[in-house]
Amino acid sequence: MRNVLELLSDETLREPDFEQAERLVSAAIPVSDLPLLDAYSEAVTGAVEKVSPSVVNIEVEQKRSNSQQGAPAHGSGSGFVFTPDGFILTNSHVVHGAQKIEVTLSDSRHYSADLIGEDPDADLAVVRITAPDLPAVKLGDSSAIRVGQIAIAIGNPYGFQTTVTAGVISALGRSLRSQSGRLMDSIIQTDAALNPGNSGGPLVNSRGEVIGVNTAVIRPAQGICFAISINTAKLIAGLLIKDGKIRRGVIGVAGQDAPIHRRLVRYYELPAETGVLVLSTEENSPAKRAGLQEGDVIVSFSGETVASIDDLHRILTQEIDHKATIRVLRRTEMRDLEIVPQERNSE
């Protein structure tokens, strides 16, 4: 039996016959694989249909300094409506320094938007529009995602509205430096293709739940793209809506989520099987002064369980400039250390 390529090159196919070509390709796929392909397609299309009405295009007119001349600079990116009353989540670098923000909905309606607040350290921002009948996305739980599961990115790369790319979760717990210079933790790595203009758009699971905010690509590489976890985004967005800014405490460590040996979990009766592994400590930092060391695993802070970087970030938005107790596992020994988180840029 001739293969599909031979059939497609047959002289009988002198004119393009796409229906016949499709039948030939379908015939070449084993019947047993068709349900799997159909299931994958249904998962992607179903998720896209749920989320794409909430994805917006953001056009920005940038402020110019006194030393700059000429017409204002323009930029664009993506975002998504996450509340029915018009709050939109996007990246800070999309709207930073904007003097005018315009939002275009998926149904082509245009609205002026107000900047509610931004956090350059987490590369997140919230803008708001006043419009009727706004569909809002469903926010998922990024702590429940696993490497290898389907990841779908929706955005407006190069102005091509509501572009969809699909791939998988490539890795979890990555670190990425924001444009402010701060190291962002608990970053999701995916091979769902991102391009300029995708920034701020949603990363979605197969159930149509947003699990991340697309933020960056490594330009020379292929298939290495990053998103901010939605659990971090939910925390930051709530504070931005409440206060318009983030007061963030820091202790001066770089860390990542790490498992704790089951014997230690049972022995110390820990409420979680994960903690935050200290990769390094900064000089003259609260962590250094408290005696934190590389290799320590943070398990609680001020009596609150620390099972992930997200937990530590959440606690540090509340604990600033007063003494707290940080509990760490150092090899097999549990230690309590006194630490005083300081507000970022306070020195």
Image (cartoon, rainbow, N blue to C red):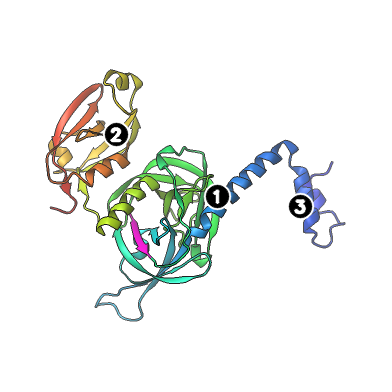
Look at discs 3 and 1 and give the one toward the viewer.
1
Q: Is residue 128 visible?
A: yes
Q: Is residue 294 visible?
A: no
Looking at marks 1 and 2 on the same chain, the residue that comes earlier in the sequence is marked by: 1
Looking at marks 3 and 2 on the same chain, the residue that comes earlier in the sequence is marked by: 3
Give the residue type at disc 3: Glu
Q: Can you identify the residue that label 1 sits on?
A: 47
Q: Residues within 10 Å of mark 1 (few under 14, many from 20)?
A: some
Look at discs 1 and 2 and give the one toward the viewer.
1
Q: Residues within 10 Å of mark 2 (few under 14, many from 20)?
A: many
Task: Tell me the number on the disc at residue 277.
Answer: 2
Q: Position of residue 114 (x, y in %)?
A: 34, 68
Span of residues in magenta: 120-128
Instruction: Label 3, secondary structure: give it.
Output: helix
**Along the viewing direction, whichever of 334 and 117 lies nearer the viewer:** 117
Q: Can you identify the residue that label 3 sits on?
A: 22
Q: Residue furthest bottom?
A: 70
State the separation of the CA atoms marked 3 and 2. Answer: 52 Å
Q: Position of residue 206 (x, y in %)?
A: 54, 45
Are the residues flagged by discs 1 and 2 in contact, CB closer than 8 Å?
A: no
